[in-house]
Amino acid sequence: MSNRKTALVLGATGGVGGAIAEALLRHGWHVRGLARDVEAARPTHPKVEWLRGDAMVQSEVVRAAAGASAIVHAVNPPGYRNWGSLVLPMIDNAIAAARAAGGARIALPGTIYNFDARVRVIDADTPQEPTSRKGAIRVELERRLANAAPEVPSLILRAGDFFGPGVRSSWFAQAMVTPGRPVTRLINPARGGGHSWAYLPDLAEAFALLLESPNLPPFERVQFEGLYDASGTELIDAVRRVTGRDPKVRRFPWWLMHLLAPFGGFPREASEIAQFWHHPMRLDNAGLVRLIGPEPRTELDTAVRSSLVSMGCLAPQAARLTDESV
């Protein structure tokens, strides 16, 4: 199928890719997804056209992107393992597929790891001076997109830490609260105020609006402001209001992550990004606003409530009762 509004979403079985796929569907796009196990993927997003393939196999990505006008690159190595050896080959495959499709635009969810954590505000012109292995790889990934333009146009929408329905791999879902259980305690990774969060449905809507903007240049970087938690407790306070509980708040054991980092795995990954929880950093969304108008923004308590219900931490009935008691 060839269509001006056809998008291939790489990583559509994940939280970020799946949310962007659903947003594009709402905007009238024909959306394709690539999955090694199509039968398992299809129930997650029934309206997506699922194709069998692997993002690490260039010929399969090229085939899936035929006739597409956009490729959403929201795929990461499974479990974030082998990051250094897999991330760059996957973006090279996406660039090759976009070129073969006649210049499809690549849309990439960007991160803050490209920067020194001591930078207070990030905008499109902020120098990328990473201090971690993961950050250096992300800088190279974006450089390859910039070099491919204008033959292959691209869009990078940078955001803070994700939370929202369907987000399984996030600090909110994996560290702050325990999925499947009522919220009786909270783990706070922050060491002060100034952390940036992105409610995934809002971010996905911003992607859809940007991809339909007639004013996008061949290569564009914009920032999604989301929730700038100035106090470091805004998200925690919202959990208290939504659940009607006063859970104990404990500090995340960063010291343990640093101690175990030499053994690899999650402690090493967490230790590398600890600095982003120790310094305030805000994302300047002026470029985004110029292109699409006001940033999509769901009221915080509504966003937290839907996230907790999705995670099985709050029953829908309880959520309704909380709404009515406000």
Image (spheres, rainbow, N blue to C red):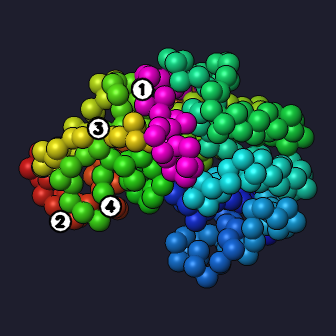
Residue at point 68% right, 59% down? Answer: 10
Q: CA distance from mark 2 to mark 3?
A: 30 Å
- Amino acid type of disc 1? His
Asked if marks 1 and 4 touch (Cβ < 8 Å), the reply is no
Q: Secondary structure at mark 3?
A: strand
- Amino acid type of disc 3? Arg
Q: Nearer the viewer, mark 1 or mark 4?
A: 1
Residues shaded magenta: 258-287
Residue at point 16% right, 61% down? Answer: 318
Q: Percent from the top left, x then y, of residue 63?
A: 84, 67
Q: CA distance from mark 2 to mark 4?
A: 17 Å
Task: Kindly identify which residue carries mark 2.
Answer: 317
Task: Kindly identify which residue carries mark 3.
Answer: 251
Q: Percent from the top left, x then y, of residue 154?
A: 76, 40
Asked if marks 1 and 3 touch (Cβ < 8 Å), the reply is no
Which badge, 2 or 4, comes first in the chain's sequence? 4
Task: Kindly identify which residue carries mark 4.
Answer: 179
